[in-house]
Amino acid sequence: KQEVTQIPAALSVPEGENLVLNCSFTDSAIYNLQWFRQDPGKGLTSLLLIQSSQREQTSGRLNASLDKSSGRSTLYIAASQPGDSATYLCAVRNTGANSKLTFGKGITLSVRP
Amino acid sequence: ETGVTQTPRHLVMGMTNKKSLKCEQHLGHNAMYWYKQSAKKPLELMFVYNFKEQTENNSVPSRFSPECPNSSHLFLHLHTLQPEDSALYLCASSQDSTGDRGYGYTFGSGTRLTVV
């Protein structure tokens, strides 16, 4: 059974800092990995999708990497801003019929002005 | 807006009420999902529909009844709920659940449900 872990559960950093959010998963047989952002009380916004054959994806100040063999992904946020404050969730989609997403519990990020 | 619309955004209902949540997408996706998000817990998959057919029921109590009349619409009918059912209910869609898995999921903004 796939398990996704995100540690720490919460993180507070000063504005302008570059930071890395970690995600680990137990079963490397995945099709893809997706990073989402969730603001309090809101739905999920997809940030980056990495296919199992890819090593990284970039969008603006965000860069996500994937090391499938070691079961790890990182989300790098450059020059963090207060507007980046949110919960960041990692989810993996396993191989196999009717595969579905398995989510981590998320990392709640607070960027201090 | 992400392309997946959920209504209502907030719902307060008594334990004896019957209500429905609605989800709509016009992304051309063929798979739709209901997730439950409770405080301090990972998202829990509830139901999966692929081409209007239910392909997964993740041991959800019968007081939750899904309906998928077509690939663009998904409902969650609620009756005789318990206070512990209070949560954020999220709808999502994807290209399909069995085909090209290279596509990601698109989520709606959710319905915040409070059972009193």
Image (spheres, coloured by chain):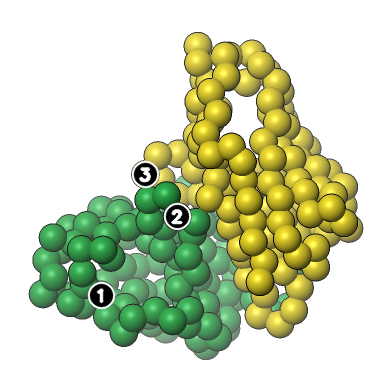
Q: Nearer the viewer, mark 2 or mark 1?
A: 2
- Where is residue B24, by image quadrant? bottom left
Residue picked out by circle 3: A41
Image coords of residue B83 (percent x, y): 20, 63
Q: Tag 1, which chain?
A: B
Tell me how far mark 3 sits from mark 2, CA to CA: 14 Å
Question: Left or right: where does residue B64 sit relative to residue B74?
Answer: left
> Who's the residue at 62% across and 21% down the image?
A80
Amino acid type of the residue that numbered disc 1 sits on in the rendered structure: Leu
Image coords of residue A62 (percent x, y): 71, 33
Q: Is residue A39 above or below residue B22?
A: above
Amino acid type of the residue that numbered disc 3 sits on in the rendered structure: Gly
Q: Where residue B41 is drawn, which disc sits there?
A: 2
Residue B95 seen in render: no
> Who's the residue at 71% across and 50% down the image?
A24
Question: Left or right: where does residue A26 sit relative to residue B76?
Answer: right
Q: Where residue B78 is drawn, which disc sits there?
A: 1
Q: Which chain is yellow?
A: A
At label 3, counting other C-alpha atoms closer than 10 Å, the crowd grade (few under 14, some 14-19, many 20 or more) is few
